Image (cartoon, rainbow, N blue to C red):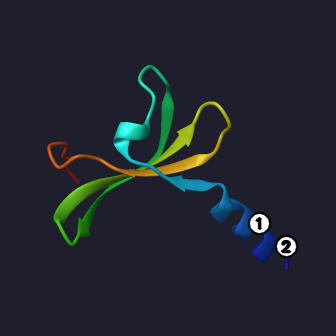
Amino acid sequence: MDALKNNLIKQSNTRFMSVGDMSIGQLYRIIWMENRETQYGVTVHCVLEAGDDGGIMEVYLPRSIKIKD
């Protein structure tokens, strides 16, 4: 039961944001970054830690940014 509770807390602490909603000058620690196939083609998906509250943010980077595997 504790595993379920911890999983729900983690999910509720995750926000999906647009790159445009991020603050300039704010530091975001990269937790995970990967190429991901979407309905619009391959894009970069980032999981970031917000510096102010330690929450987790997920963003998709613009198509002009690419990473190599």
Question: Quick one: which residue is furthest to the front in this view?
Answer: 21
Whether residues under marks 1 and 2 lie with C-beta atoms below 8 angstroms apart, the answer is: yes
* The image quarter in which residue 52 lies: top right
Q: Is residue 58 above or below residue 42?
A: above
Quadrant of the image containing the C terminus: bottom left
Q: Residues within 10 Å of mark 2 (few under 14, many from 20)?
A: few
Q: Quadrant of the N terminus?
A: bottom right
Residue 2: x, y in percent?
Answer: 85, 73
Q: Residue at x 70, y 69 (%)?
A: 7
**Residue 28 in the image, given as x and y percentages of width and height:** 49, 33
Badge 1 crowding class, 10 Å Cα cut-off, few under 14, some 14 to 19, many 20 or more, is few
Instruction: Looking at the picture, tell me which residue is in the foreground, 17 or 43.
Output: 17
Give the answer, above or below, for where 29 lies relative to 59.
Answer: above
Judged from the image, the secondary structure of the residue bearing numbered disc 2 is: helix
Specify the quadrant of the image occupied by residue 37.
bottom left
Q: Which residue is mark 2?
A: 2
Give the amino acid at mark 1. Asn
The x, y position of residue 50, in whole percent, is 57, 37
Position of residue 8 measured from the top left corner of the image (x, y, whole percent): 72, 69
- What residue is drawn where x is 59% and y is 56%? 14
Per the image, the residue denoted by label 1 is 6
Residue type highlighted by circle 2: Asp
Disc 1 versus disc 2: distance between alpha carbons? Answer: 6 Å
Residue displayed at 29% across by 47% down: 61
Which numbered tag is attached to residue 30?
none
Dot 1: element: helix
Spot the residue most to the bottom: 1
